[in-house]
């Protein structure tokens, strides 16, 4: 039996790990005394990602060279594995990564197309495939297991469950990072789940958190839309 031993959701400028908000950034504008309040400018995705990176004290110089999709996925994976996961429990080839989204690398594709009008940018071109994000995660943590990236209109938890079950039931993986990472302009969502064959240190009140599409969907939902 497989278990969800950790989760990380990033959306609306809030980071949730194991279903608890651990970082939030809201725009602020100091208002001089005696003057009416002024609406602050919105926080951009790059600003939010940089703020979260520094808030959690992460150190990885290559982070600054990544595109927005890779930064978001890398950050979510870093926080997913930050507490409780022991890479020494697995061989590198036993840890798989299975991700999906609806826009592939379109956010970066647009940026690369814009550079073609002048001088094409090799640094941007590198990220015009969505599975490069998986590569960044695997390089960072030295994972060498099976990996796959799928495109779907929306988060398909049932498909992810089926695919990951197949990997782990056939002993092709002992642990798997799976979920959804999508970026287009200022619209973004990351939802990663760590799946293991042992309960680990589950974050729910129950003795374990069985891996299922229903459980992933519940965690994936915005906090204000949940109903117990």
Image: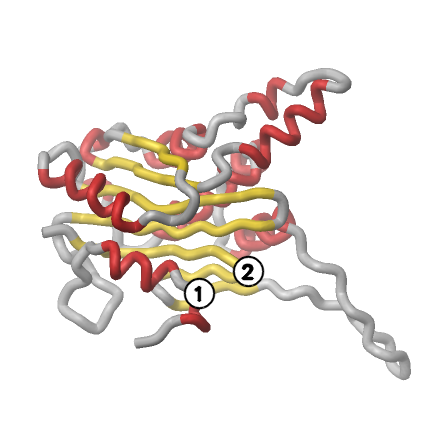
Q: Earlier in the sequence, mark 2 or mark 1?
A: 2
Tag 1 secondary structure: loop
Rendered residue at 56%/59% (across/down)? 13
Q: Which residue is mark 1?
A: 222
Comparing 138 with 171, the one in front is 171
Q: Which residue is mark 2?
A: 12
Q: Is residue 82 above or below residue 163?
A: below
Rendered residue at 53%/57% (across/down)? 55
Q: Callout 1: 10 Å neighbours few (<14), some, many (20+)?
A: few
How far apart marks 2 and 1 lie (CA) works out to 9 Å
Picture colour scheme: secondary structure
Q: Looking at the rendered structure, which numbered label has been put on residue 71?
A: none
Q: Is residue 218 visible?
A: yes
Query: Label 1 near label 2: C-beta < 8 Å?
Result: yes
Tag 2 secondary structure: loop
Tally of marks:
2
Q: Is residue 201 left or right of residue 150?
A: left
Q: Is residue 78 visible?
A: no
**Of the two numbered discs 2 and 1 in the rendering, the one whose residue sits closer to the viewer:** 1
Q: Quadrant of the C terminus?
A: bottom left
Rendered residue at 66%/52% (across/down)? 44
Rendered residue at 10%/40% (across/down)? 169
Q: Is residue 109 left or right of residue 89?
A: right
Q: Residue 167: x percent and y percent?
A: 17, 36
- The part of the image, by quadrant, that contains residue 99 is top left
Q: Is residue 197 left or right of residue 111?
A: left
Q: Is residue 27 above or below residue 117?
A: below
Q: Residue 191: x percent and y percent?
A: 39, 52
Q: Residue 76: x percent and y percent?
A: 42, 49
């Amino acid at each position: 039996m497989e278990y969800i031993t950790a989760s990380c959701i990033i959306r609306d400028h809030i980071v949730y790990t194991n279903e608890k908000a651990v970082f939030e950034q809201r725009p602020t504008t100091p208002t001089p005394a005696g003057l009416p309040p002024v609406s602050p400018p919105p926080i951009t995705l790059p600003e939010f990602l940089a703020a979260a990176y520094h808030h959690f004290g992460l150190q990885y110089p290559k982070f600054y060279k990544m595109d927005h999709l890779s930064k978001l996925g890398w950050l979510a994976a870093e926080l997913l594995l930050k507490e409780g996961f022991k890479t020494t429990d697995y061989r590198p080839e036993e840890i798989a990564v299975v991700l999906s989204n609806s826009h592939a690398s379109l956010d970066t594709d647009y940026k690369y197309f814009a550079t073609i009008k002048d001088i094409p940018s090799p640094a941007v071109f590198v990220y015009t495939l969505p599975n490069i994000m998986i590569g960044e995660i695997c390089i960072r943590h030295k994972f060498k297991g099976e990996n796959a990236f799928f495109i779907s209109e929306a988060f398909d938890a049932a498909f992810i469950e089926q695919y990951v079950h197949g990997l782990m039931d056939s002993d092709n993986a002992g642990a798997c990072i799976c979920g959804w990472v999508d970026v287009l302009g200022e619209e973004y969502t990351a939802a990663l789940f760590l799946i293991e064959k042992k309960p680990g240190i589950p974050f729910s009140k129950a003795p374990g958190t069985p891996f299922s599409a229903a459980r992933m969907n519940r965690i994936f939902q915005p906090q204000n839309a949940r109903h117990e």
